[in-house]
Every structure is written in C-alpha cells, then in structure tokens.
Amino acid sequence: MKLPKKAVAVASALAMVGLLTSCIGGAPEAERAAITEFPDKWDDEITIDVFDELANYMGVQEGWFADVVKKKFNMKLNIIAPNVAGGGDTLYNTRVSAGNLGDLIVVGKGKKLDELVKGGLVSDSSPYYPAMENVEKFDTAVTHLNDGKDGVYAFPTSVSSIKPTEPSEGIDPTFGPYVRWDLYKQLGYPELNTLEDLLPVLKDMQDLEPTAPNGAKVYAISLFKDWDGNMMVTAKQPTTFYGYDERGFVLAKADGSDYQGLLDDDGEYLRTLKFYHEANQLGLVDPESTTQNYDTMWSKVQNGQVLFSWWPWLGQAAYNTDANTAAGKGFELAPLKDMTVFSYGAEAYGAGPVITIGSKAKDPERIAAFIDWLYSPEGTYVNNSQTMGAAGPQGLTWDLDDSGQPALTELGKQAFIGGEAEVPAEWGGGSYIDGGSTLNVSAVLPADVDKETGLPFSYKSWPSYQELVKTPLSEDWKAKMGDAPTTMDYLKDNDQLLVAPGASYTPPADPSEIETLRNQVKAVIVQYSWKMSFAGSEAEFDTLRADLQEEAKGLGYDKVLEFDMETAKAQNEAREEVAEKLG
C-alpha cells in the first residue's frame, strides 16, 4: 500500500530518530527514582522550548502569564509554533529529524503521539506522576490515553469532572438558530415550528432593515466557502439543529438513533440545500457568498449586514457590542419548536491535543511540575484565559466578593467587557490580552467546576457576571424565554438539547483507496451544493440534485459512505460505553 507523501515524510524522520532511541528513550526514565512532591522553588532560571501545534504566537512568552510562570517556576517559555512558521508538518518533520522536538510538546493525540513514543522523542513521566496531585484527579483520562504504552507518556487536555452525558459548552451551545432579536421582536416574535418557517420571518426582518448603518445592503443569510471539506460547511450547520453532526459523508444523530448519507433524498443535508435555494429565490442570500471567505462574512455580521447565524460565536461575538445590546439590538437564539440542538458532551477522557515532555528536556522534573500546575484550579484560571472564557489570575482580573462568590475586579471588567486593560507592573505590565497564555490549549475544560466556589472556571457562567452584563436585549430575550438565565438553561428546560456523550473517540485514518475516492467525491459534493443553493428554479435544483447523486456514485461515494458509516457506528458504540460506565 502506497503511503501519502505526508506519512512518508513523518515515517522517514522518525526512522532517522530511531537510531537515537537507545540513548534518549525509556532507559533514563527507568533509572529515575519516583518522587512524591515537587520542590517549593527552583533557584536557576531556565528557558524551555515549547513545540505547540495549536499556538498562534512564535517567540518567548511575555506579559502577565510569563510573570506568573517566572515567579512559580523560574522558567521562561519559548514558543515554537508551526502555525506561525508556515503551517503543515515541515517544522515538525525538521525537528523530529534532528531528534529534538522540544522540551514541552503539545501535539495531536493518536497516530502522531504513537510515532513520537516509538521514536523515543518523548519521555515517560512515570517517575513524576506520584507528585502530580492535580493531574491525578483525572487519572481515568490519563490511564486511557496511555493505555498500551507501558508508561505515562502524555497528558490529555480538556479533561473534566463533568459527566460525559452533560454538555461541555457552558452558557451557549456550539450550534443554534440565532437571529437579530430586535427585528424578530418588531415582528411580534412569530412562531417558528420548523427550519422552513424561518424563511418568511427572515424575509420580513430583511424588509424591516434593508440597509445597514454603513449603507450596504442587508441580507438575511451570508455564506462562505473556505471551510468546505467533505461537504459545503454552511449546509451542514442547520442539521445540527436537529441533533446531527458529521462523520465523513455521514450525518449521525447524537443519540445514535439515526444515520444518514449526505445525499439521501429525504436527508437533512439536501433539506438544507433546498432551504438555501428557497432563501435565495426570496432574495435573502448574499450574492457574494460564492466568492467570500469567513473573515469577509464576519465583517458583514459585525456591520449589521447579516440577520441569521448558525453559531453564538459568530452572530453574538461579532454584533453584540455594548452599544448595540444597550440599544436592544443583537443576536439571540430563536427556538424552532421541532429542534433538538446537538451538543458535545464533556469528554470523559479529554479531547484535542496532548501535552508531553520531550526526551531531551531541560529539567524534566520542573516541566512536570509546570504541567501539573496547568491542571490545578489556579492553572486553569490562568492558562485558559486565552481560549474559552476562564477568568485569569485571582487578585488581578477577579476575586471573591464579601459573600465568597467570584466576581470580576475593575481591571477584569475592563479586560473582558471593555475589550482591553493595562496590567500593573507587579503583574508583568503591558496589555492584558497580549500577556495571556500563548499555549492556546485548555488542560481542564473551562466549563468544569471549581470546588472552592461551586461555580465553573469560566467567568461567563458566574451570577455576578450575568448581573453585570444585563442589557435591554438580554432581559427581553429572557422574558420571552420564561426567565431562563442562559441559552443552555432554556434548551435543557425545554428538552431541546441532544447531548452526544463525550467518548474521546478517535476515528481511524482513511485507507489510501478511501482517501483517493473521498477527495474526488467531496469536490463534486461541494461544487454541486453551491450550484443547487443558487439554482435559478426548482426544476434546475432537482436536476442538479439528480446529477450530483449520479456523479458522486460513479466516483465511489457508496464505498466511502460504507466506510464512514462503520466509523459513525463505532463512534456511537464508544459513546454508549462511556455513558454506561461514567454517565
């Protein structure tokens, strides 16, 4: 079987490193005596190289996070970021070939981690594990990740004490039908029974505000192309309103009750394409959708040129400014009566990348102590601040109020609500945003609960924050939604959330034949999806659909679908297993 070029490059690099395994592999760790506690301080300052596949910053960490790490560990972090160095695996392969990926390493789990362990580029942290009291709280996830590796080679991220059958997202789901609530309110909050009921409502909303403040024409819907993969990405999003998520060419329901091929005649994907086609016939779809990218579309949402969003982190994040929400303007969830929104359950065994110590690391014990700190409550607040709404350092951006509840400080209000704040010199100085952790990875899920406060690490879930950010917009939405405190509360209370248990499932890589077939089929699916969305008539839409189904089948769609269906069902089995075991 012929390996893809990328796999050959990695395999070749690791083969070269294999010659070094005897001197940098497991032997030194085996000779180290286990420790049960870390030193209180380190006298000598060190700078460690952090190879981080998620980082979007290259160079030595600066600002308040650097100050915290320096005071606790007498250590500086030199971030090596493939994303900044041109992307892809070029930098990874170069450093692997040299036999030293980094002192601290953040990489994807699965195949890449396995290769690094076999190649001797990462250390067995077993000697330090007895001292890692914070990591030990998530021992089930650590054990699962290192199963079959004969040691503790890596630590999972986004771990949580939340049950895998509970949502992981916090106050908002990942997906949902979000609309310009102020215009929806002007229409008298019309009833929305199904996805299709949005069309006349969006038409009336567009008629209410045909022109944005910048003078540009307003469209209810604006699409973009640059995230397209196995399908037209914006055509997948409304399927999540009904509990589906993608697994290759399969749409799988969160509870395993249904599996659909993308091209099924009565499936949700073709339903969405028909929805966009009908929206376009009504003049609701931005004609620049076929050529613009996400950033351009984001700017249009920000400028008030778009009235519908599939995600809170688009509509609300771009448009719900202080000025707009104070005026009662902004995006809020407009529930469809028949929806059950897909939610990602908290991952029982962690999700995303892993953290590991390089086999040539300077002072691996100190790095192990640093890793352990990332899983502590303090580390969770401090490190997660860049990624998912954690509150930053206690005493700087937040503190406990007179009732013992967490609340933002004045500087925290400036940083998180005002948009920016200057940090005092005793905390490292400079801009708060610029000084945040550049690791860009959450060791502990921000939705997890701090046992001391009884509230999530994410400040957005705190009652004090909810009170602080009350606006005419949020108050009107809550009143209409039966006084639900948050979107997630409303969905839970009304049985409109479908949680996919967090099983930390890793799908198998495509065999070479499947990969080849997939690449040619998905190109056709994406091409026809756009044509169908902008078809000039229903007859043209139906013709294009038939052509797509025929052409895709001729290129091997059914074979790839069969492979993806097996993967989707294996994923559900893993979900059922973890729900039974830990739910």
Image: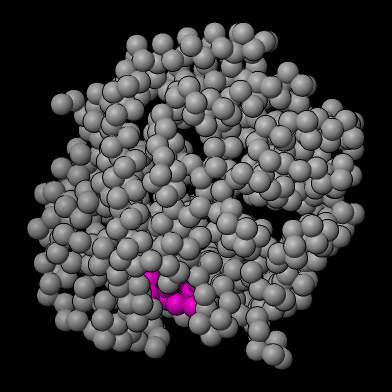
- Tell me the quadrant of the picture where the C terminus can be found: bottom left
* Residue at 29% in and 29% down: 562
The quarter of the picture where residue 533 lies is top right
* Residue at 71% in and 25% down: 279
The quarter of the picture where residue 364 lies is bottom left
Total marks placed = 0
Is 375 within the magenta? yes
Residue 362, horizontal then vertical, whole percent: 30, 68
Residue 311 in sight from this viewpoint: no
Residue 405, horizontal then vertical, whole percent: 66, 84
Figure check: 189 above or below 72 = above
Figure check: 151 above or below 568 = below
The quarter of the picture where residue 136 lies is bottom left
* Residue at 61% in and 44% down: 338
Residue 319, horizontal then vertical, whole percent: 77, 47
Q: Nearer the viewer, residue 122 or 234?
A: 234
Helix, strand or loop: magenta stretch? helix
Q: Which residue ends up furthest to the bottom in the rendered image?
A: 402
* Residue at 71% in and 34% down: 197
- Tell me the quadrant of the picture where the N terminus can be found: top left
Is 575 within the magenta? no
Residue 56, horizontal then vertical, whole percent: 52, 50
Q: Would you say 561 lies left or right of 399 here?
A: left
- Magenta-tinted stretch: 369-380
Q: Would you say 565 lies left or right of 315 here?
A: left
Q: Nearer the viewer, residue 2 or 444?
A: 444
Q: Would you say 172 lies left or right of 215 here?
A: left
Residue 246 in sight from this viewpoint: yes
Colour convention:
one colour
Figure check: 244 above or below 355 = above
Q: Nearer the viewer, residue 202 or 350?
A: 202
